[in-house]
Image: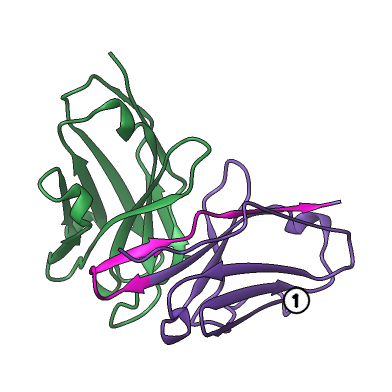
Amino acid sequence: QVQLVQSGAEVKKPGASVKVSCKASGYTFTSYDINWVRQATGQGLEWMGWMNPNSGNTGYAQKFQGRVTMTRNTSISTAYMELSSLRSEDTAVYYCARDRSIPAALIYDYWGQGTLVTVSS
Amino acid sequence: SYVLTQPPSVSVAPGQTARITCGGNNIGSKSVHWYQQKPGQAPVLVVYDDSDRPSGIPERFSGSNSGNTATLTISRVEAGDEADYYCQVWDSSSDRVVFGGGTKLTVL
C-alpha cells in the first residue's frame, strides 16, 4: 500500500532553516510528483510547490521563491523540503502529497502524516 | 491572483443532503478537486476533476461545476462526515495551486 512517512516535529529559531523529509513506499517513487502543502494552526491549506522525483525538476509558489528548496534521494525513495530564513509566520504543519496522475495533474491522492514546524525564539 | 471562496460553515442533520460551494471567477472552466480533513489528520481526496470519485470514496459524495460556482454534495449525511472540506484548482495564469479557505461541516 502507498505510504508517505514524514520526519518528526521540529523547533527552530527565527532565521534558521528546517529540512523535512518524506519517505515513500508502496509504489515507484520516481513515477509521481511530490508536492508540499502547509497549514498553520486553525488555518487553511497553502501550496508551496512541486518536485518531479525522476528529473528533479521543481516549481515553487512565488511566495516561497528564494526560501524553499525541494530535493530528493531516489536511492531511498525520499523527498525533502527545506525552508530557510524562518519566521514565526512559518509555524505550521507541513505535508508532502503525491500527485495521482502521470503526467502530473496537481491532484493529491496520498498525503504524509504531517510535520509540525514551530518557529520560536 | 485567483481566489476561491467557500462558506466558513455548513450545518446539516443526519440523513439530509449537504451542499458546500466554492466560488471563483469562471471556475467552470477549471477542474475542481475536493478534500476532506478531519481534526488532526491529513486531507483526503473525495472528488477530483469536478465530479469523479477516487476508489473507496462512497457514492454519497458527488461534485458539479458550472459558471462561477463548484459544489460538493454529500447525500445521506452521516456523523462521520463531519470535517473541514477544501476545494482546489490549478490557476494557470499565476502558475500555482489554489485552495479555498475551507468549510466546516457540522452534523447536527
Q: Residue at x 46, y 64 (%)?
A: B4
Q: Residue at x 36, y 31 (%)?
A: A91
Under circle 1, the secondary element is loop
Left or right: where does residue A65 sit relative to residue A19? left
What color is chain A drawn in?
green
Left or right: where does residue B94 sit relative to residue B78? left
Residue for badge 1: B60
Q: Closer to the camera, A43 or A20?
A: A43
Residue B97 drawn at (x, y percent): 34, 65
| Residue B93, magenta (yes or no) | yes
Quarter of the image for the C terminus of chain A: give it: top left
- In the depicted structure, whether residue A67 falls above or below residue A30: above
**Chain shown in purple:** B
Residue A73 drawn at (x, y percent): 17, 55
Magenta segment's dominant SS is strand
Residue lying at the far top of the rendered structure: A121
Residue B50 drawn at (x, y percent): 53, 82
Q: Residue at x 31, y 18 (%)?
A: A120
Residue B67 drawn at (x, y percent): 52, 85
Residue type marked 1 = Arg
Q: Which residues are magenta?
A: B90-107
| Residue A39, magenta (yes or no) | no
